[in-house]
Amino acid sequence: MLDYEKTYVESIKNPEIFWENIAKELSWYKPWDKVLDWKYPYARWFVGGQTNIVYNALDRWQNTDIKNKTALIWVSQEQTERRFTYGQLNEEVSKFANGLKSLGVKKGDKITIYLPRIPEQFIAMLACLKIGAVHSVVYSGFSADALKNRVEDAQAKIVICSNSYPYGKKVVESKKNVDEALKENKTVEHVIVVERMKSDEIRQSQIQSDKTSEKNSDSIQLNPIPSDFIYIWWHELMAKQSTECPTEMMESSDPSFILYTSGTTGKPKGIIHGHGGYMVGIYATLKYVFDIKPDDIFWSTADAGWITGHSYILYSPLINGITMFVYEGTPDFPDIEIWWRLIDKYKVTKFYTAPTAVRALMKFGEDHLKKYDFSSLKILGSVGEPINPEAWLWFYKHVGREKLPIMDTWWQTETGMFMITPVPSVKLKPGSAFKPFFGIDADVVDDKGNKVPTNTQGYLIVRKPWPAMLLDVYNNPTRYKETYFEKIPNVYFAGDSAKIDEDGFYWIVGRNDDVIKVSGHRLGSAELESAFVSNTKVAEAAVIGKPHEVKGESIKAFVILKQGVVPSDELKAELVQTVRKSIGPIATPDEIDFVEKLPKTRSGKIMRRVLKAQELGLPVGDTSTLES
Ligand code: WT7
């Protein structure tokens, strides 16, 4: 049994030695000259070392028994299965990598992947990294506008999407969003389209949805592909490619991917991760926290549109040589027993999900899980937002059958890897994310950087760099420095509030900036506000997050209409559509109030804190800077 306290104390005496020993377990084309180069605010790990994430995720298994082991089990919404061994996955990735090269893709080129949760999403990601291209995965639920901004910011050369894909009872016309997003685009040369649905399936589902449900905005079009020269079918591109493709040797700190995430300003920021440090961080954290064993079947219910899908659906499981399990559908499709049925049928051993899903499933009681055999399960995990003790206990009792530990992992797009997390051997407290992972020098401090007393709320910070730390914010080093390293001098500022109790356990309270967490998805107040204002009837808007039973937080907007515009329920519905169109269905506002005025500082900044306090009936606090 791993002794957490002893290992932690040892690791923190010299984190560089701790991480170096882990790096030695992985494959490098050329070893590093220096473990860490820390020039505030930039950390560069394994300097001089050359490797590639794909070299560790696929190549190194090809001459071992793992070549014939299942790398991916994928189950579609229709419950059909696709399986890939490490050998087969390697061939598919090599073929697609050659396909990209045939289109002129070179090391450092940016590629936007706008695919649903299908095997091609993973193949595309791995293929990019293999040839040193940088992927930017955009969640398939984002709207055309959101996609457009991300493609433009990254200056992508290629976009990869699917034609249409099933999402519960709906069909999402993904490619139509791409058409719209690329209307005025200047950088994209090719769009590669995966045929997720045949036209007859699309037609069939349209007939069904016409019969059974209201016409929704995702209603479908029958000609899935226009004749425009830049469009290429995935399967046609693949048909011509060889299964041999060399893996590019990357410098440890060369970028591997960009992932856009919301912050406090209107525009999402492109978080850049690397190859060497990132792979060492994600490899070690999964290995220790989920106690990885060779026959593990690891199921993370996230989507590769988020960091969890990068680090722990795809890259770390493959680097650890285990089997990843992926279900295409949602937790309630075809019915709310689907997750339990899949765990039972596929003998999943480690199950990693989000509090919002646990809370949603909790509402249906316990009968729906009782008939399933969960004896394969060994460890459970949670991520995305604080898990309330009630949900924790339900998860523990009914999925863990009072035997399995729950790893509540606190981390972020920026951290790349688990930061505050238990390991399976420790005693847990429901609702606490335990303590820092090995080598992580975290703390809770006040705004000057001084440690706050026990059980006092403060800012969660990290004092020393860790290997999977973001490399930068794409095209915006100023924002990198200001957001993460200047709020409190010399330390990484996470943007969360937390407390440390008398036993040293961390209790994450939530974000202390204007980031709203809706069902674990990160949305910025300013981003939502600019979506509202894009409607010409709106003069101004302020958006806050409110506690919500299932979603964690819900979106509430205060809207000032332009002169002469009459408030109405129809207008509210219209504004909901405006926001959905600008960001996507995950950003659907829950409440809209039309107001005459908003609380502002003398310099004109909206004081969302005041709105929030008022909305929740809490003391409004210091209002000395309030203009009116
Ligand atoms: C924010 C980061 C990391 C993968 C998914 C989210 C919140 C994340 C926890 C947890 C309490 C958590 C924080 C953090 N968060 N995990 N276990 N307990 N809060 O990644 O979209 O970058 O969001 O999610 O507020 O800052 P993300």
Image (spheres, rainbow, N blue to C red):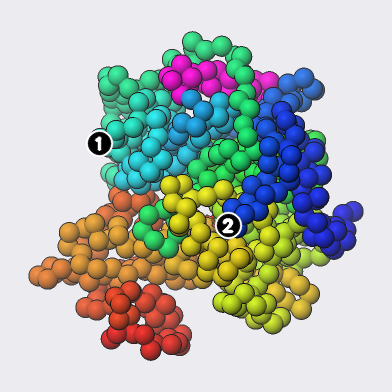
Which percent across, then down, holds residue 576? 29, 58
Identify the mark nearer the N-term, 1 or 2.
2
Q: Which image quarter has ligand 1?
A: bottom right
Against 457, residue 537 (above or below) is above
Q: Secondary structure at mark 1?
A: loop
Q: Is residue 276 something that shows in the picture?
A: yes
CA–CA distance between discs 1 and 2? 36 Å
Residue nearer the viewer, 7 or 219: 7
Q: Does residue 115 appear left or right of residue 499 in this picture?
A: left
Tag 2 residue: 41
Q: Which mark is residue 184?
A: 1
| Label 2: which secondary element | loop
Instruction: Specify the label residue 306 is tagged with.
Output: none
Q: Quadrant of the C terminus?
A: bottom left
Q: Crowding near pointer 2: few (<14 within 10 Å), some, many (20+)?
A: some
Is residue 97 highlighted in magenta?
yes
Which residue appears at 65% of the width and 53% of the height?
38
Magenta-tinted stretch = 83-105
**Residue at figure coordinates x 21%, y 78% from the top left:** 596
Looking at the picture, tell me which residue is in the foreground, 49 or 131. 49
Residue 302 in sight: no
Of the residues shown, which amino acid type is indicated by label 2? Pro
